[in-house]
Image (spheres, helix red, strand yellow):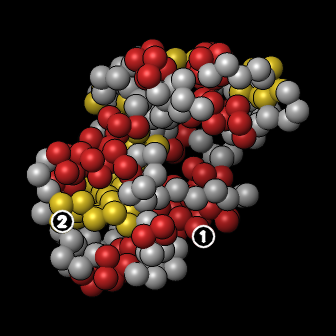
Amino acid sequence: MRIAVIGGTGAVGRHAVDAVKRSGHEPVVVARSRGVDASTGAGLDAALAGVAAVVDVTSFQAADADAARRLFGGATKNLLAAGKRAGVKHHVLISIVGLDRIEGNAHYAGKREQEGLVSSGPIPWTIQRATQFHEFAAMVAEWTTRGDTALVPPALVQPIAAADVGAVLAEIAIGAPRGMAVDLAGPEPQDLFDMARRTLAARGASLRLVPSWRGGVYAAEAAGEVLLPAPNARLAKTTFDEWLAVEGKRR
């Protein structure tokens, strides 16, 4: 089976590509660096020729919700149209746990647009919502750094390894469409602020972290258990401690 990974050179995409290979199937890496642009549709028809399933792990940065909806929506429409022309039988989308509970985040608005297009689209589908990746806390600190200070929300999350997400996406793509899959999460809850502190310490970074909901990533609407998975969630094995011991120390 030929399985196209859209965004196959990224943090999750490369793991999905590796997992497809391990399963004995043929991955097709779709990325701008390979001459294919989902945002414009350029190169998609050629890239999806003979592909049975598509795994979409693309992501976009947007200044506001309207821009995010345009970016995610435009790329998704292009992928679905090209997939239909190519005879793709399964469209797999990575999304976010708690997507319907967060209103003040532009990225979430774009992902909701994407989910709506896929679930009402012409190709049988599976949407896999996952929790934040282990790398996310340090990324938040980077995004919110001003001078020697960064604002990190004290959010309760249940982080997951990107490699575990990639493996599950490959498994789903090989199988039959499921519709909305159960939530996917790491094995244990963590405090996002503490994750950032520990990651930066492991990397030897000198940055003052302030616990705050004012950094622009999450507002106080994300407090409590809003970002945690449903009780029936599928749990991956890699803990944050295990990730930090290996990957977290890499700058």
Element marked by disc 1: helix
- The reply, left or right, for residue 200 in relation to residue 95 is right
- Number of marks in picture: 2
Q: Earlier in the sequence, mark 2 or mark 1?
A: 2
**Disc 2 target residue:** 2
Q: Residue at x 77, y 28 (%)?
A: 151
Q: Where 140 sits versus 44, above or below?
A: above
- The reply, left or right, for residue 204 in relation to residue 1 is right
- Residues under labels 2 and 1: Cα distance? 29 Å
> Could you say where residue 59 lies in the image, as x and y percent from the top left?
52, 56
Of 140 and 84, the residue lying toward us: 140
Element marked by disc 2: strand
**Disc 1 target residue:** 70
Q: Are marks 2 and 1 in contact (CB under 8 Å)?
A: no
> Could you say where residue 200 lies in the image, as x and y percent from the top left?
65, 22
- The reply, left or right, for residue 30 in relation to residue 224 is left
Disc nearest the viewer among 2 and 1:
2
Q: Residue at x 38, y 62 (%)?
A: 6
Inspect the image, locate mark 2, and give the three-letter code of the amino acid beneath it.
Arg
Hey, which residue is sitting farthest right in the picture?
A: 147
Q: Residue at x 73, y 58 (%)?
A: 63
Question: Which quadrant is the C terminus positioned in?
Answer: top right
> Could you say where residue 204 lies in the image, as x and y percent from the top left?
67, 19
Q: Residue at x 28, y 65 (%)?
A: 28
